[in-house]
Amino acid sequence: MKRALEGAVVFLIGAIGIWGALKVPSAAPGETWAGLFPMFASAALVGIGAALATGAMKAAPSGVAKEMSEQSGDASNMWKVFALLVISLAYFQTITLFGYLIPTAIAAPLVLSLFGVRSPLGLAISAVVCPLVFHVIFFEGLGVFPPYGEAFDLLDVIQG
């Protein structure tokens, strides 16, 4: 039952991700669509969620399962799954309003904290490094069209 519930939540996160990716505007001719990576990642989450929910995905090897169960209890894991869902929904909404940089600078330390990073310095550094690294990889390196904010976008200020 627990695995089916976890699978349903992962499936829901993936489905919301697909819905969000479909809202990304089309790319200009010759450019890569910005929704391509989120679409593939979300589709993978839908598949994993469906496999978990239907029991098609087998349990992790005993060593991995034992290590995971020692790290935290069931309630803690479910709390993390729902917290990640809330963060992802808020991230999607704020990206449409404020562009890429500000929401990523806020979401990166939240997600890293959720997965166990406790160093205040490390979390502060992630607020700067994650948006920068992702920007360089996707928008500069891959030529993906960056999502600009409707209300305010820090890229407008930085680029002039």
Image: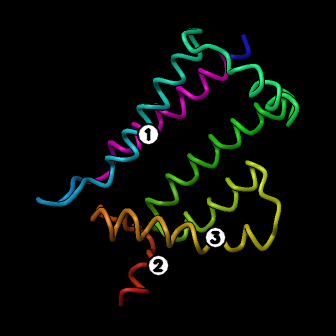
In the depicted structure, whether residue 88 falls above or below residue 107 = above
Q: Secondary structure at mark 1?
A: helix
**Prevailing secondary structure of the magenta residues:** helix
Tag nearer the camera, 1 or 2: 1
- Residue drawn 76% across the image and 24% down it: 65
Magenta residues, as a range?
A: 4-25
Residue 158, quarter of the rendered image? bottom left
Q: Residues within 10 Å of mark 1 (few under 14, many from 20)?
A: some
Which residue bears the numbered disc 1? 41
Q: Quadrant of the N terminus?
A: top right
Horizontal arrangement in the rendering, residue 124 relative to residue 97 (left or right) = right
- Distance between the alpha carbons at the discs numbered 1 and 2: 26 Å
Residue for badge 3? 127
Looking at the picture, which amino acid does disc 3 mark? Answer: Ala
Q: CA distance from mark 3 to mark 2?
A: 14 Å
Residue 76 point in image, percent of width and height: 83, 35
